[in-house]
Image: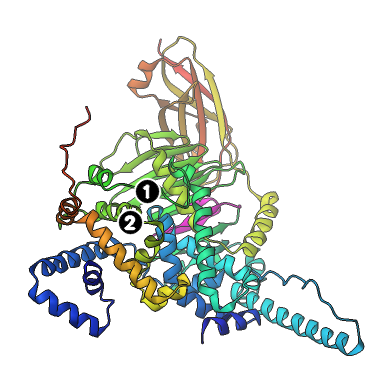
Amino acid sequence: MKERIAAIADGSIDDHDRKAVMDHVEHCDTCRLELERMRETVGVIHRAFSRGRLVADLTSRVMMYLPEMEPELPACGHESAPGRAETSGYLWALVAGVAAALLLVAGLTWLTWPDSGEQPIASWNRPETAGVILGLTKGITAVGKDGNVPIRVAKASYALEKGARYETGTGEAAVLGLRDGSRVSLFEQSSLTIFGDREIMLNSGRACFEVTHNGERFRVKSPDGLVTVMGTTFGVAVEQGRTVVTVISGMVQVENSSSFVLLTQDEQTEMGMAVTTLAVRKNPSDVAMWREKVQSLRVDRGLERQWTRLADGDGATRPVRAERVFVVDVGTRKVSGLRVEWNHDTVRPDAMGYTVYVRDGSLKPLAKGYIPGRVFVDAKSSSFDLSLPEQVREVKPSLLHISVVPDVDSGVSTTEVTEVYALTEP
Amino acid sequence: MNDAECVKRCLAGDADAYAILVRRYQGAVYATAYYYAGRYNAAEDIVQETFWAAYRSLRMLKDPDRFGPWLKSIATRTSVNWLRRHLPRLRRETPLPHRQQRSTEEILERYGPVTTTTDRVVLVDWIRDAIDTLPEDLRLPVVLRFLQEMTYDEMARFLGEDAELTRAKVRRALVLLREVIDPAARQQKDDEEGIIQWPRVEKK
C-alpha cells in the first residue's frame, strides 16, 4: 500500500489504479495521513533539486566542439575467396566510405570554423588588432571605440580590437588570446576594455589573466586600483564597489592611490573606496575556485594553435621601456628621502611620469612615490628628491630596493633614470 | 526519428542527427553527472565531455537501438574519471563511483532534521546524502525523475530497462527516502520493528 501511495504522490499511476487507491484513502485515516506526508517528502525532494536542474540547452555547445569520429576497425575473420565481382563490390564500399568520411570532415570543419580559418592571420598584422577570441560560451558583446554600436559576437576567431570594450551577459563567457601570448578568461556579466598591448581595464565582473613573461609589465586596471605583473596567473573580481585580486601562481603587484603590496601564490587582497592600506591574506580555496572556473571554459584547439604560433612570432618587434631597478646600501644611517637623477636629453614636451617603488632587502614593500612627467621637461633640473614617510624612516632598512617604472598613461616619451641616491639625516 | 535511425545517420556523416540525440539525452546525462559530481558544479562539463566521447566512439556502438544505455555507461565513466582527476585537489575524499553509504543517524547529526524552513543549500546536501542511503540501483532513477523530471519512458530508454521496473524502483525509493526524511515515518518504522531508541550518548 505504501508503494501505491508513493506512486500517487509521484503521479506515476494509471487512472484505474489511482481511482482504486484514492477510494481507499478517503475512508482510511492512516493512509490519508501517509499520502499527505508522502506528498510533503516529494515536495522536499523537488525543492532540493530545483536549483541544480539543467535548464539551458547544451546542444549547440556540444555540437561546437565535436571530435572527429574514430575510424572503423577493419573487420576480422572475413572468409571469402577473392573474386572479381566481390573485389569490385568491396572497392565500391570503400569509395562510399571515403566519400562519407569526407562529408563528415567537411561537416565538422564547418561546425568548428564558421568562418575561414585564415581570418585571424589576415588581420593579425594590423596594428589595431589586440588579439583573437579563442573560445566562447554562447557569445559576447563587442563595443567599438568610435562607433559605440554594440556587435554580437557568437563565434570564436573574431579579432579583438584595441580600444574596444567586450562584455558578457548571463551565462556567457569567453577566452581571449592577446597579441603577446597572454590569455584572458572573461566570466559571465563582466566587461573589459583592451587599451593596448599588455594593458587592460576590467570595468566589472570577473576575469582571470594568464600572462606570458616578456620583460615588460602587464597592467590590469580596475575602478579601485592597478595590478601590474611580469608573468603570472591571477584572477580579478570587480563587484559591489571593491576589487579582489587573487594570485594563482607567480608574483603580482597591486596598488591603489596610496599604497602597494606584493602578492604571491594563494594570496589575496582587496581594494575599495574604504580601503586605504592594502592587506594581504592567504586564501587557497578561492584559488581553487578560480582554477576550476578557468578550466571550465573551452577553447577552439585549432585556433589556439594558430594563435600560439602568431604570438610567439611577435617577440622581435616588442618595444623596450625604460624601467630600472636600483639597490642602495644604506647601512645603519637613517634615510629621510631619495634623490633620483636622469640624463637630460633633448626636451620633449610629453614625458611620462615615473612611479618609484621602494622595498626593503627582502622585497617587502615600504613606500611608493611619483615623479610627474613635467619634472623631466624642465631643462634646468636633472634630479628630483622624494621624501620618505615617517614610518619608513623608523623601520631603518639597511638595504633599499628601488624600482623606477614609467607611467605609460601620463605621456609618450621615456626618460633614462641613471642613478638613485639615499638622502640621509645628518 | 528514433535513436537507431539517428545513430545510422550520424555514422553516415549527418551531424544534425547527432544534435537530435544530444537534445534528447542531455537531461539524462546531466542528471547522471549531477548524481556523481553535482556538488562540484561539474555536471555541465561532464555532459559536454560525455557527448564528445560518445561521438568519437560512435562506431563502437554494437546495437544502435541501445544508444541510451550505452550513453549512460559513457556518462558514468566520464563522471568517475572527472572525479578521479579533480577530487584529490578539491577535497581529500576517495574518488569512488559508489559513494560511501550514509546512515540516517549520520545525516541527522550533521544537518539536523528537515523542516519547511530548512535552508536550500543545506537541503541540497541533505537530500543528496539521503539518496546515498538508498540501495545502489535505486539512486540514479530517483535523480533522473526528480532532478530532470523525466518521464518513465525516457528514463527506461536511458537506463535500458522496462518502464514498469523503473517506476517500481522510484516508488520503492520514495518509501525509503520518506523514512529518512520524515521524522514521523521514522518513528512509525521503529514501532513496527519493535525498536526502542536508546537515548544517544553525547560525545565529549
Label 2 SS: helix
Q: Quadrant of residue B6?
A: bottom right
Q: Main secondary structure of the magenta part?
A: strand
Does residue A157 show up? no
| Host chain of mark 1 | B
Label 1 SS: loop
| Residue B186 rendering spot, x and y as whole percentages | 19, 53
Q: Nearer the viewer, residue A410 or A82?
A: A82
| Host chain of mark 2 | B
Q: What crowding class fits label 2: few (fewer than 14 Cα within 10 Å), some (14-19), or many (20 or more)?
A: many
| Residue A55 rendering spot, x and y as whole percentages | 36, 70
Residue A228 colored magenta? no
What type is the residue that disc 1 sits on?
A: Gln
What type is the residue that disc 2 sits on?
A: Ile
On screen, residue A337 above or below B44: above
On screen, residue A231 above or below A163: above
| Residue extending farthest front | B194
Does residue A304 show up? yes
Q: Which residue is mark 2?
A: B131
Report whether A11 appears left or right of A186. Answer: left
Q: Nearer the viewer, residue B109 or A100?
A: B109
Which residue range is magenta in the image? A181-200
2 and 1 marks in contact (CB < 8 Å): no
Disc on the earlier residue, 2 or 1: 1
Q: Nearer the viewer, residue A387 or B4?
A: B4
Q: Which residue is mark 1?
A: B101
| Residue B153 rendering spot, x and y as whole percentages | 40, 78
